Image (spheres, rainbow, N blue to C red):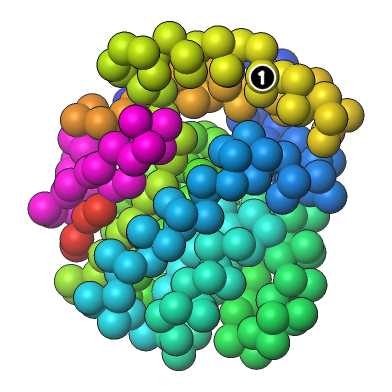
Amino acid sequence: MNYPQENIKPYNAEERKSVQVERMFDYIAPAYDGLNHALSLGIDRIWRRKAIRWLEQFHPRRIMDIATGTGDFAILACKMLHPNMLVGTDISAGMMQIGKEKARKAGLDEKITFAKEDCSALSFPDGSFDAATVAFGIRNFEDLDKALSEIHRVLAPHGVLAILELSTPERFPMKQLYALYSRFIIPGIGRIFSKDSHAYHYLPDSIKAFPQGERMQGIIQKAGFRTVQFKRLTFGICTFYMAKK
């Protein structure tokens, strides 16, 4: 099935989304961390901790962090969960290069490895991981159904999936305030941190188009996951999805 956000692309309508997303993130990689924290007013750190605390009860020994970007979630998960191994995957080599350096500085370069992977065709064998995570990257997937099926495949029996994604608030007054924020503030912050104007216009468009709440819950279940739950965080600015294989 084709979902609206799969047709939202950074640069043009003709080229594949995955190709454009890779190019965009390679280009903005040096500015990404500053841009990300500024756009969320630093609250993204709280959201990450909440997701990792949920994972603690399952004691995952083998973790894959998909769309790992510059490795913030992977590094924090490694520090809090102490897995035997953690693999961060992404299509952007530029983003992961920054992640590798951050992991090295944190003394975790022997625990965390990075791999360039297409999430819709992962190279790992069935049942390779106890937990999979996606923090603020799933809206960039070119084929959501295929990617979720691949994540389901590489998880061990009783494996778990944690997804954090930005979302649009549905209730007054946050709905109206967020509309103003995404229209005026996000482009302004984007201009400060990145020279790529397409990137900061793509961000609010992809968030708005992404299926959220009950709809996303159903999409995850369709991929084979059970007991799928979700929580809206910070007045609905972010949504946390929890699922078990």
Q: Is residue 11 left or right of residue 130?
A: right
Query: Label 1 belongs to which residue?
Result: 185
Disc 1 packing (10 Å; few <14; some 14–19; many ≥20) = few
Residue 138 visible from this viewpoint: yes
Q: Residue at x 31, y 59 (%)?
A: 161
Q: How many marks?
A: 1
Q: Position of residue 179 (x, y in %)?
A: 50, 12
- Residue ranking furthest to the left: 227
Q: Quadrant of residue 200?
A: top right
At a point 79% along the width and 72% down the height, the residue shown is 101
Between 106 and 159, which is closer to the camera in this rendering? 106
Instruction: Answer above or below: position of 181 versus 236.
Output: above
**Is 14 located above or below residue 39 in the figure?**
above
Q: Is residue 7 left or right of residue 96?
A: left
The amino acid type, in three-letter code, at marker 1 is: Ile
**131 falls in the magenta region:** no
Give left or right: position of 244 versus 239. left
**Viewer-side residue, 94 vs 142:** 94
Looking at the rendering, the stretch of residues picked out in magenta corresponds to 217-241
Q: Could you say whether the residue bearing mark 1 is in a helix, strand or loop?
A: helix
Query: Image quadrant of residue 126?
Result: bottom left
* Residue sitting at the far right: 195
Q: Position of residue 164 (x, y in %)?
A: 41, 47
> Does the stretch in magenta take in 225?
yes
Residue 146, position in %: x, y? Answer: 38, 43
Can residue 8 be seen in this snapshot?
Answer: no
Could you say where residue 160 lies in the image, as x and y percent from the top left?
26, 65
- Residue, x 63% and y 35% (percent of image)? 39
- Residue positioned 75% across, 36% down in the render: 24
